[in-house]
Image (cartoon, rainbow, N blue to C red):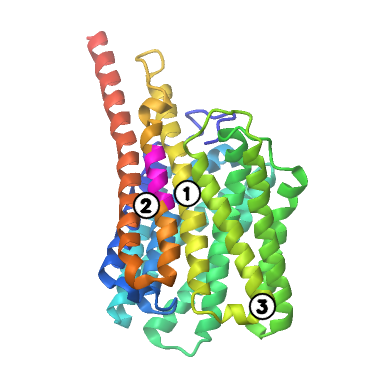
Amino acid sequence: MITTGLSLEQAPPFDVPLRFFLTAPWFLVLAALLLLWQGPAVFASRWLPVTLALTHLLTVGFMAQVMVGALLQMLPVVVGVVVPRPRLTAALIHVPLTLGALVLPLAFLSGRPGWFHPAMGLLGFGFGVALAAILIALWRAPVANSTVVALRCALGALLVTLGLGLALGVYWCCGLGLPVIVLTHVHTAWGLLGWTVLLVVGVAYQVVPMLQMTPPYPGWFMRGFAPLMAALLLAWSVLVLVGAEGMMKWVGAALAVGIASFAGVTGYLLTRRRRRIGDPTLGYWWIGMTSLLAGALLWWATLLIPALAQQPHIELLLGVLSIFGFAVAVINGMLYKIVPFLAWFHLQAQLLGRAKTPHMKQLLPEKPIRQQWWSCLATLLLLLAAVFHPAVLIYPAALSLGVTGMWLGVNLLGVWRYYRRVLDAGMATESLARS
């Protein structure tokens, strides 16, 4: 990840972020199993309980796991503030977040309102601990650089997303009279455009120039993008809640242009990489930025052409592009950079002068990364096609999604096993030398 000034004293123990990273891929496998079980019914409407269950397996089970784990790793380095008792804090987040991500889909699928009580309790507690720990660290940052500002905006968006999600959970379990459709639209926007996009933006400011060897993002862009997007999202939400459709469309169009601009700027930087040797993770960024740009343009088109917004496939297309095409693909690619680097860094720190440590390509070779990229691309294309022909293509899409998630999980698990093997061998060698 971010290496400037990195030291063992700053970085949390390897197992703090790793527990999140190793858990997340298996939620993709669960999502695939749900697709295989329910079949074409999943793509009948975004409002069906089974579709909501699938959505939250991806967003809470996969995306949130990695995003929270990455923040716990980044904070000491980017912000210069260490989360107190990192192992305990990570456990207090990881366990309820994982259990909640399992119980919430069950609540949707079972049709029993009582299941929403434990789901809300677990997710509320897990996200609450994460928000408290991370926001305190962010607001104690000695310097509020562009990354810190973007992360603050993303965490603020997570707070709104969580609050709206808990309110919708009250509706599902207690049947309170809430404008559920409007609240769901706003909840989705804050979760995807606020929490997800702005967090990826804040991380991209650091990892794209460093890990992909590109020029830095323009200073004016980094200073203004996240605050402007957060302000536009807030204005859009207010307009949606009060029913001001005319102004809402203009603000929505501005949001779409903003999202497209981030995808465009990032794509431009990727074309200017200083290193001409191919990087196997670069393809994930291209999938993510292409999907983000396509989703923004499609949303913009629905605002200009009302008849297009009424087409039954549009919302599902936007969901596939934004959740899998953008978020899952970019997170997948970043995991292949983060996990081997952290394994290498901790081995260097613990075995320096004691034993030879492997380089990152030994910890995770390029070949399995490139192979799994093809699986990720195939899954996206099959999911997009299945929106139009679910009866024929939903099962191949589900199988491809399962392969993608399992392949990612096995690759990351292989890094951890290699790390343990080298560490144990190094420690054993030192013990023999002392004896």
Hey, which quadrant is residue 339 in on the image?
A: top left
Disc 1 crowd rating (10 Å Cα; few below 14, some 14-19, many 20+) is many
Give the Cα distance between marks 2 and 3: 38 Å
Nearest-to-viewer mark from 1 and 3: 3
Residue 331 marker: 1
Hey, which quadrant is residue 33 in on the image?
A: bottom left
At label 2, the amino acid type is Ala
Residue 373 counted in the magenta span: yes
Pick whichever of labels 2 and 1 is earlier in the sequence.
2
Residue 305 marker: 3
Residue 120 counted in the magenta span: no
Disc 2 crowd rating (10 Å Cα; few below 14, some 14-19, many 20+) is many
Pick whichever of labels 2 and 3 is earlier in the sequence.
2
> Is there CB contact under 8 Å for labels 2 and 1?
yes
Measured as percent of width and height from the top left, residue 149 is found at: 67, 51
Nearest-to-viewer mark from 2 and 1: 1
Q: Is residue 118 visible?
A: no
Q: Which residues are magenta?
A: 369-377
Q: Secondary structure at mark 1?
A: helix
Give the Cα distance between marks 2 and 1: 10 Å
Nearest-to-viewer mark from 2 and 3: 3
Q: Is residue 113 visible?
A: yes
Measured as percent of width and height from the top left, residue 102 is found at: 31, 64
Measured as percent of width and height from the top left, residue 91 is found at: 36, 50
At label 3, the amino acid type is Ile
Would you place residue 426 above or below residue 155 in this image? above
Pick whichever of labels 1 and 3 is earlier in the sequence.
3
Name the residue at 35% across, 50% down. 404
Name the residue at 36% across, 40% down. 15
At label 1, the amino acid type is Ile
Foreground: 22 or 299?
A: 299
Residue 24 marker: 2
